[in-house]
Amino acid sequence: MTTSTKHPAGDTAVPRLFHRMYHDRISPQEVLSVRERVRAMADEIVAPAAHAIATGDERVEGFPREVFDALAQRGLFRIPFGSDVAGDNLSYPAAATAVAVEEIAYHSNSVAAVFDVHCILAGNALKHANDKQRQQWLRPLVAGEIIGAFATSEPGASSDLTPNAVQTHAERTGDGWLLNGTKRWITNSPVAAFIVVLARTDDRLTTFIVPTNAPGVSVGVPDRKIGNRGQLTADVTLSDVRLTDDDVLGQPGEGLKIALQTLTYGRIGIGAAGVGMAQAAFDHMAAHLANRYAFGKPLGANQHWQFAIAEYATQLEVARSTYLKAALRMDEGIDFPEPEAAMAKLLGTRLSVDIARDAVQVFGGMGFVQERGADGATSVVSTIYRDSKIGEIYEGANEIQKWVIARRVLGRDITG
């Protein structure tokens, strides 16, 4: 079966090549059903808004609230969670969440990133919460009544989350904790009700649930980025924020384990988002190669582009299968499914950049513009090109993923 998607700003219908090229013998039926369900809601809700989100100004248009609310109403945020917080209580929640990310990213990596941080990072971290915290914060997150954020990165610490590198710190007081520091690149922070914050406590790390309306919490102006413009990021300044033991997530001193397990899950999601963008760029590229004529023949008649398409089709197969395997291992109860999680992020994000770059080349001048002045025609591949690069950077730069993989091969005693 080959379906088509039409870009709302006027592009011609583009055949979706997913079913022609990928025969899923990995996913359980439950996951296949989630993919179809999320694809339908993404086509209906995300696709019509994707161009405006991709070309907007973070500080003017702001958070894509209407899209977020519509996805919440359709139950997107229930997928990763159990019935105790009104989730879907799936048998394979990680795999189902990953395919949902892919289907959302096919149209908008901004929306996929919002979903990733809301559910995979903030929401997943709250799986370590006690019953009171789960009902207070996780239940409304699942319903989409509030938005969550997750803060590990700092001006001087991102991939390095050792206690010596993390400068945000919480000191014990007579009746709780006093939190100080600055977090950077914090997705959803301008609209979040709470932020899961990683902080140094003595010589270890602890995670805290920090309400954004608490005195001393200040969220800065949203960053202006070259891509993912619907994913609002900003600095979060914490100045003498008073917290109680009820705000500690998990146990004091266990924050690094919680953060790393959450980021491992996040890397699977980022890999899936990369595959979603790669598939979209691939579909647009293949359609253009078949329909654009030069020197009396389709562009696709040139062996160079035939070989490129063949290589990318093969890499899409590998990247999708890898993130699914990593997610299914997580569903088996493995908190750190390495090396597959690192491989999934490395493969998916690199592939999205590579295909998007070649798609821009195939489209020529039309691949380089956002909107053509002559007739208002828009370019999907230019959006994917801008949005895809961040995948190689955030939630553990791809160089870190290579190090993780090498460590599994050579051992810690050699790689460190």
Image (cartoon, rainbow, N blue to C red):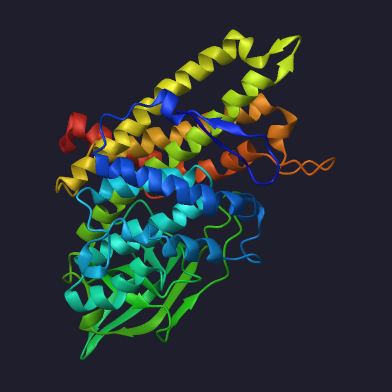
In this view, the residue farthest toward the bottom is 174
Residue at x-position 57% and y-position 40%? 384
Residue 37 against residue 143 in the figure, above or below: above
> Which image quadrant for residue 359?
top right
Residue at x-position 71% and y-position 27%? 364
The front one of 16 and 342 is 16
Image quarter in which the N terminus is found: top left
In this view, the residue farthest toward the front is 1
The front one of 111 and 208 is 111
Residue 158 against residue 27 in the figure, above or below: below
The front one of 374 and 130 is 374
Q: Is residue 275 left or right of residue 298?
A: left
Image quarter in which the C terminus is found: top left
**Spot occupied by residue 290 in the image (x, y as percentages of width and height):** 63, 19
Residue 148 against residue 108 in the figure, above or below: below
**Spot occupied by residue 113 in the image (x, y as percentages of width and height):** 45, 53
Q: Is residue 319 left or right of residue 294?
A: left
Note whether residue 203 is visible. no
